Structures are given as C-alpha cells and as structure tokens.
Amino acid sequence: MRTPETLAVVGYIRVSTSKQDVSPEVQQAALEAEAVRHGWALTIYRENAASATSLKNRPILADALAQLKAGRFDALAVSKLDRLSRSVADFAAMLETANRQRWALICLDLGIDTSTITGAAMAQVTCTFAEMERKKIAERTSAAMRVKAAAGQHMGRRSVLDVATVQRISGDRADGLSLARIAAGLNADGIPTATGKTWYASTIRQVLTSAKARDFATLCNK
C-alpha cells in the first residue's frame, strides 16, 4: 500500500538482442531488492528486444517518461545505466529533464539516486567526469594528429582511425544503433573523423565497410 511518503518508482527493464545482455530476471531482481530496501512502490516496465537508438524505437520507455512527466510516478530506476543509454550526452539530457519535471533518476550500478542529496551530487560528479573524459579523448586525438603532421605524415584522406574508435563503431552497430546515431554519439563525445571533421552516417558506413574488408583480407592471408 502506497503512503504519501512512499516513493512511486518505475523500474525500467530493457532486453536487447545482444548475447552479452543482462537478463531481465537479473535486472528485475536487483530493482525489487532495492524497492524492498527503501520501501518503494515499484512498477516494472519491460521493453523486449528494443534498440537503444531512440524513444521512437522504445515505446515502453517513452510511455514511462510520459507517466513521470504527468506526475503519476516519482522516479525512474534502472539496474544499469546502459539500460537507458550508452551515450553520456543522452544521460545528461535525461538528468536535465528529470530535474526540470521534478522526478528522480536512479541507476543502481552507479549509485545514483537523485531523490537524495548524496545521489544527486553523485549524478553531477558522474557527468563532470564524463565531460572531462570526452575532452581528454579529443585532446589526445588532436595531439596525435599534430605529431603526425609535424613528422610529415599524410593527414588527408589516407589517414586511418585509431583501433579504439573503429571498435566502438563496430560495437555500436552490433548493438543495433543506426549509422546516424553512431555518428551523433561520436560528435557528442568530441571524437573527430580520421581527417578531423564531423561524423555523418555516410562516414560511419565507410568505416564499417573498410573494417569488414580488412577482416576479410586478414582471414585470407592466414
């Protein structure tokens, strides 16, 4: 029975097609245990085999957010942050929305619970460090390009991406993200293309095509 002091919480569970995905049973068990610990009135919203690319592809999450905006729930909780988004920019935007609409965001794996003073501070710290990491990546990329240019190495169309960026693109695509979404995430994180320019869907397609060609060539040469 919910009392005026009870926090009404939407427990959001997302089940993707990834083989490394956290099972819905594990997600629900973690949320239910936390609900018992804190006395929440928990309602589970489950999204089956959903892509993380947009709310359009995640109608259950869109409905949960609408219920939160309408004031029918006090908080949105997930067992892991990646159930909501893998993009730091999206996470920061959701935090801003939660603050504006006066509902709390709870991520068990990060210890974030904006319904508490400590949890809200933790959320801000997380976003701050994420922003610092984005800037560090951008600075390292720029520094590497300057070193190559000073050494007389070609910086035009023959430039190649670092392995970490290629792996990120391939991983995002394997997780079901669209080409446009992958490009937006790289731009948001301050990671430039091989030529130091802005990412587009067509650029992502070129990287994926090149990666497949290299993998095929490696296999043939074994």
Image: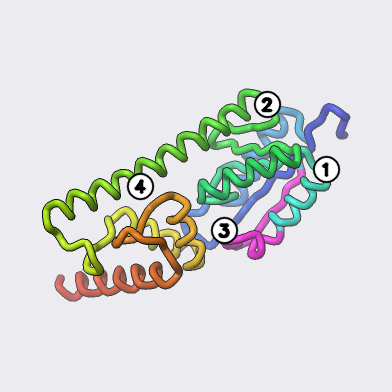
Closer to the N terminus: mark 1 or mark 4?
A: 1
Which one is in front, 216 or 91?
91
* Residue hosting label 2: 116
Q: Amino acid at mark 2?
A: Thr
Q: Amino acid at mark 3?
A: Ala
Q: Residue at x 38, y 69 (%)?
A: 203
Q: Residues within 10 Å of mark 1 (few under 14, many from 20)?
A: some
| Callout in the foreground (4, 2) | 4
| Callout in the foreground (3, 4) | 4
Q: Is residue 44 magenta?
A: yes
Q: Mark 1: which secondary structure?
A: loop
Q: Residues within 10 Å of mark 2 (few under 14, many from 20)?
A: few
Disc 3/disc 4 C-alpha distance (Å)? 25 Å
* Left/right of residue 103 with respect to residue 150 in the rendered view: right
* Residue hosting label 3: 52
Q: Residue at x 79, y 37 (%)?
A: 8
* Residue hosting label 1: 71
* Residue hosting label 4: 138
Residue 170: x and y in percent read 38, 62
Q: Which mark is residue 24?
A: none
